[in-house]
Image: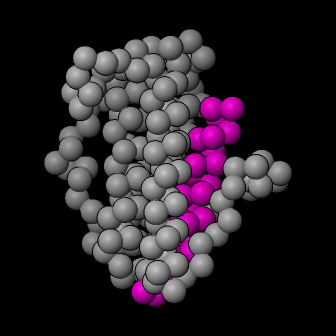
Amino acid sequence: MLQDLVHHKWYANAQLLAVIRQTPPAVQDRQLRELMHHILLANRFWLRLSQGLPFVLEAESHTPDSLDGLVAQYQETHAEETNWLGQMKDSELERQLQTPYIPGRSFSVEQGIMQICLHSHGHRAQAAMRLRQLGGSAPGLDFVMWLKDRPPVEWPPC
């Protein structure tokens, strides 16, 4: 189930970015780009934490100036996370993570992955609303519809 949620997350992110790409006012909208970057920022934080790699907030917090730059970062993170998950052993899911952003608590890798999926889902809904305000039409991104055919991730061109 966790693998399915992660694959759906990337599919949904790519589909939403593709529709943004097709909506000229959305391509130029800083608010929408910042929201999509926030989704990626959180994903990269939990991914790095789960991998035991450093996360440099100052460097990661810069929202790209263009949609192309943002799509490129999504593609890079998708490849990195897919590779990591493909090599991860099930026993690794129980390893505990600690973050300075939530002191005094620890979370399993599995819970961190679930956080990434749920967090991006909520913010994609916000992005879809913003896209509609800008004259676009949000794609259907329901998990159960994705399960039917399991379409692959197709990133919009950069």
| Residue 13 visible to an observer of this rendering | yes
Displayed quadrant of residue 138:
bottom right
**Looking at the image, which residue is at 50% across and 59% down?**
124
Magenta residues, dominant SS class: helix
Q: Is residue 3 above or below residue 121?
A: above
Q: Is residue 6 magenta?
A: yes
What segment carries the magenta color?
A: 1-25
Q: Return the x and y of residue 144 as percentages of the image width and height.
A: 76, 49
Left or right: 68, with 131 as reference point: left
Residue 130 or residue 20, whichever sits in front: 130
**Looking at the image, which residue is at 16% across and 48% down?**
58
Left or right: 58, with 10 as reference point: left
**Looking at the image, which residue is at 53% across and 19% down?**
93
| Residue 152 visible to an observer of this rendering | no
Displayed quadrant of residue 139:
bottom right
Q: Return the x and y of residue 5 as percentages of the image width and height.
A: 63, 40
**Looking at the image, which residue is at 32% across and 71% down?**
31
Q: Return the x and y of residue 105 as percentages of the image width and height.
A: 31, 18
Displayed quadrant of residue 88:
top right
Residue 47 or residue 104, whichever sits in front: 104
Residue 85 or residue 101, whichever sits in front: 101
Q: Residue furthest right?
A: 148
Q: Is residue 91 above or below residue 102?
A: above
